[in-house]
Amino acid sequence: MPALKLLVLADPSAPYLRLLEQLPDDVHIVVGDRKERFLEIAPAADAVLCGIGQGGLLRELWPLFKNLKWVHSFSAGVESVLFQELVTSAVPLTNARGVFARSLGEYAIAACLFFAKDFRRMVRSQAEGKWDSYDVEELTGKVLGVIGYGEIGRAAAIRAKAMAMKVYAVRRRPELAEVDPLVDRVYSVPQRGDLMAESDYVLVASPLTPTTKGLVGERELRRMKPTGVIMNLGRGPVIDEAALVKVLEEKRIRGAALDVFDVEPLPEGHPFYRLENVLLSAHCADHTPGWVEESMQFFIDNFMRFYRSEPLENVVDKVNGY
């Protein structure tokens, strides 16, 4: 059997690439972040690991591939990788779905607590040397509504249940959540406004696809409780950003916890920076120590399945985009 040829689209100096040493000696590995590096070997490539931000390079190389059998996205999100030629091809695409879910699930609960206990007020009062006694809320009995009940949503649901919260979920296929012991109530996508009206905290964890862009707009946001909090840990454009700024400025809802945005880095002077009812993080809620290595290890394990002709994990539905 000829040696498998793996193309790794990434900065050759990236430390996490040392994990490639785990692969069998007979695997021919070529690493680079420029098209010229792959011109000779691309026609014979069996597999491609597409690193973060390398979707454009993958598309450039695509016409050269004659033997490609598998593409893996280092990220969980695949919107930057799904160009038409790949979607319509027979080449399977896998991703890092689930690798980062634990940390994001914890972040969701941390955001709930941030607003329930009003930690911003606590920190401000401490900085001012002010003895400021006030009432705080419990999460017990509150409703966490999840739009996009995948790996991240389920990780948040597990932790919400530990806090004695109720969990409502929106799914494209509601029947998949009907037997989930974590879910107290399930909604279809057209019913997302109903979920938002009945939830105390709304977690948006949907992938970005043509059908999810702007999924949460002004109409849905205005159905939230005045005490409601919305969180986005999926992709920025799933929420209509202009509409969210508007309801936050009007204080129509209590607040928002945001880790993803329409444009990243978030431009200087953006309203989110100045709004007191926004908890903002720089798309780093899943950047735990070793997160890059975890994603790489998942690829290594999946490659060994490929090497042994076993079924791959995390195969993406290329048409639906996740």
Image (spheres, rainbow, N blue to C red):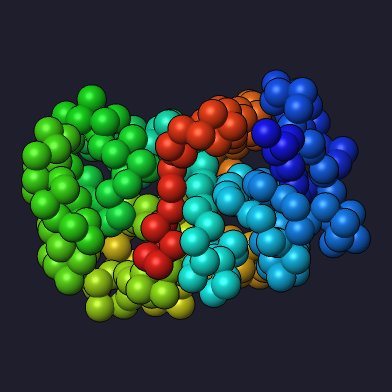
Pick the residue in front: 224 or 4.
Answer: 4
Residue at 29% in and 63% down: 253
User: Going by the picture, which residue comes out furthest to the right?
Assistant: 36
**Residue 206: percent from left, percent from top:** 37, 57
Q: Position of residue 199 (x, y in %)?
A: 18, 53
In-front residue for pair 192/179: 179
Write the residue at 57% across / 72% down: 85
State how many labels appear. Answer: 0
* Vertical position of residue 164 compared to residue 49: above or below: above
In the image, is 322 to the left or to the right of 14?
left
Q: Which residue is found at the position 28% from the left and 56% from the top?
A: 147
> Which image quadrant: the C terminus?
bottom left
Residues 65 and 254: in front is: 65
Up the image or down, 35 lies above or below 103; here it is below
Q: Is residue 64 left or right of residue 102?
A: right
Q: Is residue 186 visible?
A: no
Left or right placement of residue 90 versus residue 203 in this view: right
Q: Is residue 139 above or below residue 215?
A: above
Q: Quarter of the image containing the N terminus? A: top right
Q: Residue at x 22, y 61 (%)?
A: 172
Q: Position of residue 72 (x, y in %)?
A: 58, 47
Q: Is 307 above or below relative to 316?
A: above
Q: Would you say 52 lies left or right of 114 here?
A: right
Residue placed furthest toward the front: 1
Q: Position of residue 17 (x, y in %)?
A: 76, 33
The answer to whether residue 212 shows anywhere in this view is: yes
